Image (cartoon, grey):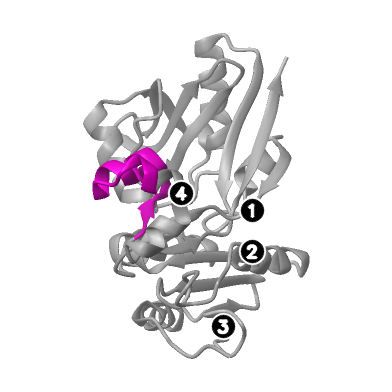
Amino acid sequence: MKDYRLKWVDDVVDYLDTVEVKYDENTEYSIYLPDYKVAIDFYSLYHHSDLKGGKDKTYHFNKWKKAQDNGITLYSYFEDELITSFPIILNKIRYIVSKNTQVIGGRKCVIGDTLPKQERDFLNSYHIQGGSNARNKTIGAYHNNLTLVAIMSWLKKPKYLEITRFACDSKASYPGLFSKMMKHMIKELDYKGPIVSFSNNGHSNGGVYNASGFTNVNEQKGAYWYTHDYLERENRQSFMKINIKQKFNLTQEYVDAHTEWQMMQEFNYDRVWDSGKIKWELIIT
């Protein structure tokens, strides 16, 4: 049983009560929605860290995988995500329980370019990871030729094309829109070859890729983040050995004698492992 409760659970429960959706809190998950076979977990960084929480590199991936094997879709969010992006998370839950009363088919939307500020503001409002500089171009979907309702960004790499962001607003459901935007992208680039994207196991079941003909290429186990205060996670890429040397003014001799993890522990950092991700691929011939 859980020995702590993050305050955001109460907010979700209040919402589910309001829309009369049945839920269960007496399971291994923070909240379980039996009518939808969906589980939602909210993770304290302290309790779900490597050292203090005892959650090693396999814990969150294995929990996600066990849920999958039992036919349950598990969405999981860490405390820093709840602090910065709870409205986006609550919108996701609203979508899961089908409380978006408006349905707008993809054919009713027009695809076009977006301005950088439009892109940034939209993704910061509707994508839990916010905007990204890892893209060559972004296209938008507009309803009634005016209202931006979806964003798709892609990045051209030497051997494949990667979709780096896709997000819709939370005001409606947009069946078929992902495929329409992807076809627009392929035509604009006159592209042939692999299209790749990744779904974060904590935030998505990859259903939009599966429905659009993508293949699950592989499931990648959890990646780690560092935390110093158990309030936020810091990208491990910022703590490669050369960066640790510069950040803490270390000698090369010291750096050579220690692993990255040994040094980070000495400077009072802990690790948090996520649930991993799935690589999806579609071959355009």
SS of the residue under disc 2: loop
Q: Which mark is residue 221?
A: 1
Q: Label 2 amino acid? A: Thr
43 left or right, relative to 29: left
User: In 3D space, how far apart are the residues under numbered discs 1 and 3 (Cα atoms)?
Assistant: 32 Å
What's the residue type where badge 1 is placed? Lys
Residue that carries the numbered disc 4 in the rendered image: 257
Tell me which label, 3 or 2, sits earlier in the chain: 3
> What is the chief secondary structure element of the magenta stretch?
helix
Earlier sequence position, callout 2 versus callout 1: 2
Return the x and y of residue 81 as percentages of the image width and height. 37, 61
Distance CA(mark 2)–CA(mark 1): 7 Å
**Does the stretch in magenta take in 243?**
yes
Q: Which residues are magenta?
A: 233-254
Identify the residue at horizontal 46%, vertical 65% (top origin). Answer: 77
Who's the residue at 48% across and 44% down the image? Answer: 104
Callout 3: SS: loop
* In the foreground, 230 or 38: 230
Marks 1 and 4, how far apart at CA: 28 Å
User: Separation of disc 4 and disc 2 at Cα?
Assistant: 27 Å
Residue 26: mark in rendering: none
What residue lies at 65% left-to-right and 75% top-to-bottom? 35
Tell me the CA gap for discs 4 and 3: 55 Å
Indicate which label's residue lies in the foreground, 4 or 2. Answer: 4
Q: Earlier in the sequence, mark 1 or mark 4?
A: 1
| CB contact under 8 Å: marks 1 and 3 | no
Is residue 139 rendered magenta in the image? no
CB-based contact (under 8 Å), mark 2 and mark 1: yes
Residue 22: give its label.
3
The one of 3 and 195 positioned closer to us in this rendering: 3
Residue identified by numbered label 2: 58
